Amino acid sequence: MKKLTLFLVFYGFIQMAMAQRPLQIKGEVVFQNDDVVFRKIDDHTWIGSGHVMSNESVYLLEGSEKAMLIDAGTTMKDLDKVVAQITDKPVSLYATHAHPDHVGSAEYFSEININKGEAENMESRMANYKGKIKYLEDGQVIDLGDRQIEVVFTPAHTPGSTTYIDQGAGYGFSGDSFGSGNLLLFSGTFSDLIATCQKIGKAMDEKGIEFLYPGHFNGTNPETRQRIRDMITLSQDVLSGKVKGDDNSGNRFGLDLIVIDYGVRINYSERAIK
């Protein structure tokens, strides 16, 4: 528990280091309490904004037969009951990764769907989760009834980071895979990040995905195709030695270097330079 608390405190500090902008999310408010505000994205999609970890975001997607909740925030009490007030379809929980600002309220769901690459993170940060764990497959399609969501593994932030693509709607949901403008390169290398950006970039081009809703959405920071290109460029600049990282002092997780360019921030350590 102490380790988890330290993680939350430090991760919150890193997120606060980003230029803070007030929420500018458009859309009708359909639910609000002390923990979360849900706004309508379109007729069958909603975003829930928390306020513990730099606008940690959860997304509720509804099909004709069932619904899925992408991520579970940090502390969103009775989240299962909250989403049940928004949709009458049965809701299943899917995670982008196992950090506590994305699975903190998973306890309200009897089952979680997640990339097996997150097993170690789950052991350390979801040790008390009592529900069933179901592992996703890369390329798997989730059929909600007249709405198909594709699973795309996008590791680098964590080993099992995952993006969900809705080709029919022309958008996706990327969690922290691309950082919401401030990427924490916890587990992967710059080569891993380049490969992941190339993979998702190709998927966006082929499937007509205009942007990805990130894990900390404030209304002005979608993950665009251009941002994905810029992350590749910055990563290549680091690997070539063209760009040197600045000191990221005070970092308690070993991410003691930072590069900022092209409107992108990447926090990393020496071990990631390969």
Image (cartoon, rainbow, N blue to C red):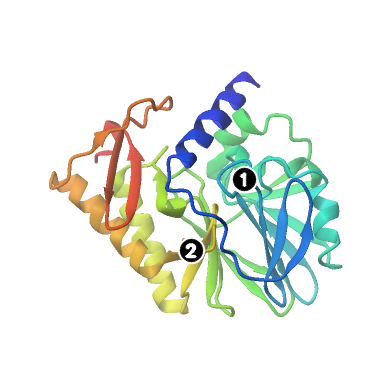
**Which quarter of the picture shows residue 91?**
bottom right
Residue 154 in the image: state x and y as whole percent: 46, 54
Dot label at residue 220: 2
Question: In the shown orientation, is residue 86 left or right of residue 173?
Answer: right
Q: Which residue type does callout 2 highlight?
A: Thr
Q: Quadrant of the C terminus?
A: top left
Q: Which residue is mark 1?
A: 102
The answer to whether residue 2 is above or below residue 180 is: above
Locate the N terminus and report the quarter of the image it occupies.
Answer: top right
In the image, what residue type sits under mark 1? His
- Answer left or right for 23 relative to 208: right
| Of the two numbered discs 1 and 2 in the rendering, the one whose residue sits closer to the viewer | 2
- Residue drawn at the location 66% of the way across and 71% of the way down: 27
> Where residue 35 sits: x, y (%)?
74, 46
Give the side of residue 193 with respect to residue 140, left or right.
left
Q: Residue at x 38, y 69 (%)?
A: 225
Q: Nearer the viewer, residue 169 or 31?
A: 31
> Measuring 42% from the left and 64% from the top, which residue is drawn there?
200
3D distance between C-alphas at marks 1 and 2: 20 Å
Against 145, is 87 above or below?
A: above
Q: Position of residue 2 (x, y in %)?
A: 62, 19
Label 1 secondary element = helix
Vertical placement of residue 135 versus 208, above or below: above
Contact between marks 1 and 2 (CB within 8 A): the answer is no
| SS for dot 2 | loop
Q: Is residue 107 visible?
A: yes
Which residue is pictured at 85% across the width and 60% down the height?
Answer: 84
Residue 181's disc is none
Q: What is the number of callouts on the image?
A: 2
Residue 221: image location, x then y, percent: 46, 61
Q: Residue furthest front?
A: 22
Mark 1 vs 2, N-terminal side: 1
